[in-house]
């Protein structure tokens, strides 16, 4: 009976209802695993290996995330769509996936993960922050040897959340995660390399974009900026 439910249970039920839109079909854990097992992980890990530390500088880190998620989208063969929404990064059908990638995010012995930052917070004194559900699965990927990928369900992440003064983190054991690659890691060949610097490629794109604007200004008649000033 509803009267026997405590406040926390009621709020949790309402949150789940609000999180899933009517008609959404969220993949079960086994179906999600089967889906990811068919992705081209060799392509993905060769891509991030070629990228290396090129975008590790603070001003380029967001660009690195864009490249990694674009590689994931491509390696999924069209199953995943990179959306970069608040609280999740990708959609696999209606299934919301948050992506965390890092060199050594899963320990080399595969026994556990690092402490994974889930959310930055500003908790008031005495307040215990709680992670609100924004995804169905957390996808965790090592960008260095061993090249492995695994995921955890939202329920597992919620159960292992660790609030700190300014973050909500989680650290997961091997029994908490489901591997979508071989435990020995995907083989990555040093013979596969990029023919050019991606950073230089991006900078050249900036230059071309800016040059196009300059060229248009050069062709356009000068405008009288004073005529566009209006007093209110």
Image (spheres, helix red, strand yellow):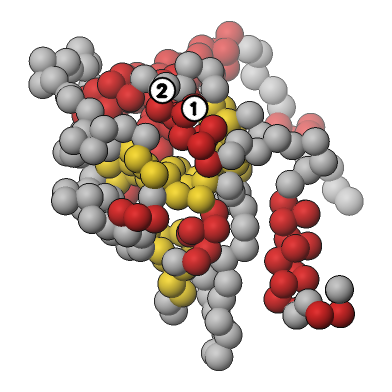
Residue 159 visible to the viewer:
yes
Up-down relation of residue 165 to residue 169 (above or below): below
Residue 39 shows which numbered tag? 2
| Disc 2 from disc 1: Cα separation | 7 Å
**Contact, CB < 8 Å: mark 2 with mark 1?**
yes
Mark 1 surroundings within 10 Å by alpha-carbon count, few (fewer than 14), some (14 through 19), many (20 or more): some
Mark 2 surroundings within 10 Å by alpha-carbon count, few (fewer than 14), some (14 through 19), many (20 or more): many
Up-down relation of residue 165 to residue 158 (above or below): below
- Residue 130 location in percent, x, y? 58, 72
Q: Nearer the viewer, mark 2 or mark 1?
A: 1
Give the quadrant of residue 11.
bottom right
Q: Residue furthest top?
A: 219
Q: Residue at x 70, y 76 (%)?
A: 8
Up-down relation of residue 152 to residue 229 (above or below): below
- Residue 80 location in percent, x, y? 54, 27
Instruction: Classify residue 45 as left or right of residue 71.
Output: left
Give the quadrant of residue 230.
top right
Instruction: Classify residue 225 as left or right of residue 122.
Output: right
Tell me the element at label 2: loop
Q: Nearer the viewer, residue 215 or 206?
A: 206
- Residue 147 location in percent, x, y? 23, 35
Tell me the element at label 1: helix
């Amino acid at each position: 009976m509803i009267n026997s439910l405590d406040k926390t249970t009621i709020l949790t039920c309402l949150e789940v209802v609000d999180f899933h839109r009517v008609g959404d079909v969220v993949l079960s854990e086994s179906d999600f695993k089967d889906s990811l097992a068919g992705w081209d992980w060799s392509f993905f890990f060769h891509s991030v290996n070629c990228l290396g530390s090129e975008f590790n500088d603070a001003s380029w880190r967001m660009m690195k995330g864009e490249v990694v998620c674009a590689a994931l989208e491509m390696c999924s063969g069209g199953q995943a769509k990179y959306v970069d929404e608040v609280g999740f990064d990708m959609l696999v059908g209606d299934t919301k996936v948050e992506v965390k990638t890092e060199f050594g995010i899963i320990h080399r012995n595969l026994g556990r993960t690092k402490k994974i930052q889930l959310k930055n917070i500003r908790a008031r004194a005495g307040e215990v922050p709680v992670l609100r559900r924004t995804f169905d699965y957390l996808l965790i990927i090592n960008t260095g040897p061993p090249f492995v990928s695994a995921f955890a369900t939202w329920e597992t992440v919620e159960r292992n959340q660790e609030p700190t003064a300014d973050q909500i983190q989680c650290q997961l054991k091997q029994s908490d995660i489901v591997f979508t690659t071989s435990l020995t890691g995907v083989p990555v060949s040093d013979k596969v390399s990029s023919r050019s610097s991606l950073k230089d490629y991006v900078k050249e794109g900036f230059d071309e974009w800016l040059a196009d604007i300059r060229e248009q200004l050069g062709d356009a008649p000068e405008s009288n900026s004073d005529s566009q000033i209006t007093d209110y």
